[in-house]
Amino acid sequence: MNQPAVFISCVSPEFRQTRSRVAAILTRLGYTPVIQDIFGTEPGDLRQVLRDKIDACEGLIQIVGQGYGAEPPTVDADYGRVSYTQFEFLYARSQKKKTWLLFAGEACARDTALERLDLPSDPAHPDPACYQAERRALQLAYCDERKKDGHLYHIATSDADLDLKVERLRDELAELRGAFRLWQNKVLHAFAVVFVLLALIGGSIWLFGFMQHHEIQQFSEDARHITKEKIRAQLLESVERTRQANLVQAEKAEGWKERERLRQGAEKAYAGSVSRIDELAASFAEIEGTAKSSQVFDEMTRILAEEGVDQALAYAGTKRPDILEKVKARTAKAREKNRSDLLLQLKSAQLEAERNHPAEAEHLFAEILALEPDWPDTRNAFARFLVQRGEVIEPAQGNAKLREAVQICRGTLALNQREKSPQDWATTQNNLGNALDDLGTRSGSEEGRKLLAEAVAAYRNALEIFTKADLPQGWAATQNNLGNALWDLGKRSGAEEGRKLLAEAVSAHPKRSGGQDQSRSAPGLGHEPGQSGQCASGAWNA
């Protein structure tokens, strides 16, 4: 098992994109991420599916938020009333899997607003607020239990903090490679005789090399100890200067209570800094001269040990612009290579969708986004796929797909600014309009009007790029979609406003038949505005 598998558990509507980032980190660290999307609209009981997936994994990371998520159709015999997400952690722990809990703070990004989480899927539910409050209470109780039952947990204050905490699990995750190392040991044992013979033949050479290595290593350890002590002394001096400066400021405050508060704050900050100095000094000394280090880092360490914190920071400041540019260039090159390699996977997903294999297509899209979550081509293709699925499957499940498409499109717009790639941006706006249009036509009264108005706005944004002169096929398809949305919105609006919107719909495409409701153009037109060789006008003709 060269790459141990780790199951990533979370409430999908709350942390789907966060889970994708965690999956990308795990992949980079050499682990295979395993996920299971659950939105509450899936038929049947998914517990056995989850058991099978978790059994095949060596560990589980759970991102814990405020959402309760979907729950099994019956109370669990072992754990009582739990959601699927809670079940994943409890089952993994019962199977002696390595488990980690990451509590996501309020500043962490969520795919669905908290007020929209844990609402009933049935819009006709008699008391949505009570339904939501009950599930929030169950999730709160679960969080309290996990914090009290002795299991180690981490609290992430932001997205960056959460990503960093996953990165820092590197050493703990390394324990999962134990099975692979055990297998290696067995293989090595089979060749023990050969190694013994080689050792006897080259024993004297090895002994000499070992002694030389030991002496060099001892010298290196002594040098590191000296470096650590020098850095520690410089850090203590810097911390003491900061403490004295804070105390001087405290004395300038008005009122004895304020002065006392500032003094206590200065002493508390000083104590905290001192408690971390040994660890910080050791971290510099341990990296210096190793494979992790660089010439610039070694020079900074030397300056820190000999000249102090201020000079080390000044030196680092002079090197920062070059380092950032170098890292950005390296990252962009790696991203370009990844996307080139994954293009085969993307086209496979699209082909699976075209031959009506939605499960296979969705699995392929998920695999790509786990590795390249910010890739506009994949995000746009996946959004189109979700809209197409949402239009043809059972309405409740279809609406879930359409809402997911809306979330993906809005996330893509946040990642891919208009100035960076105008046509990709316009394609995303068109996809967003399609998803909102479908949701609007399926929703009642005011909610439907609001969604249709948002769809109209998205189409108009797309038309700022898809102009008739520059991109006639994209213009025709998007203009067609805009006319449909305006027509639907006009029929739902009041007399004067409705007439105005219907007139705009007719103006959007002059061949619109008066009063006759037309369907949206085919997916090859309305859903892929950049596709050539198509004509959008056919969908408008009677």
Image (cartoon, grey):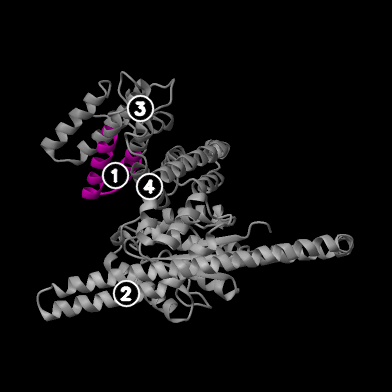
Q: Is residue 184 left or right of residue 319?
A: right
Q: What amino acid is found at the position of numbered circle 4 in the picture?
A: Thr
Residue 318 disc label: 4
Q: Nearer the viewer, residue 179 or 190?
A: 190
Question: Eyeballing the image, is 72 above or below 434?
Answer: below
Question: Which SS class for mark 2?
Answer: helix
The residue labelled by disc 3 is: 477
The residue labelled by disc 1 is: 440
Question: Which SS class for mark 1?
Answer: helix
Q: Residue 344's x, y, as percent?
A: 58, 36
Q: What amino acid is found at the position of numbered circle 3 in the picture?
A: Ala
The residue labelled by disc 2 is: 270
Q: Residue 174's x, y, as percent?
A: 60, 64
Q: Residue 321's x, y, as percent?
A: 38, 44
Nearer the observer: mark 4 or 1; the answer is 4
Question: Which SS class for mark 4?
Answer: helix
Boundaries of the magenta span: 432-460
**Distance between mark 4 and mark 1 Cα atoms:** 55 Å
Compare marks 4 and 1 and give the one earlier in the sequence.
Answer: 4
Q: What amino acid is found at the position of numbered circle 2 in the picture?
A: Tyr
**Distance between mark 3 and mark 4 Cα atoms:** 52 Å
Let me know if residue 453 is in the magenta part.
yes
Q: Residue 361's x, y, as percent?
A: 54, 43
Where, by quadrant of the figure, is residue 98 drawn?
bottom right
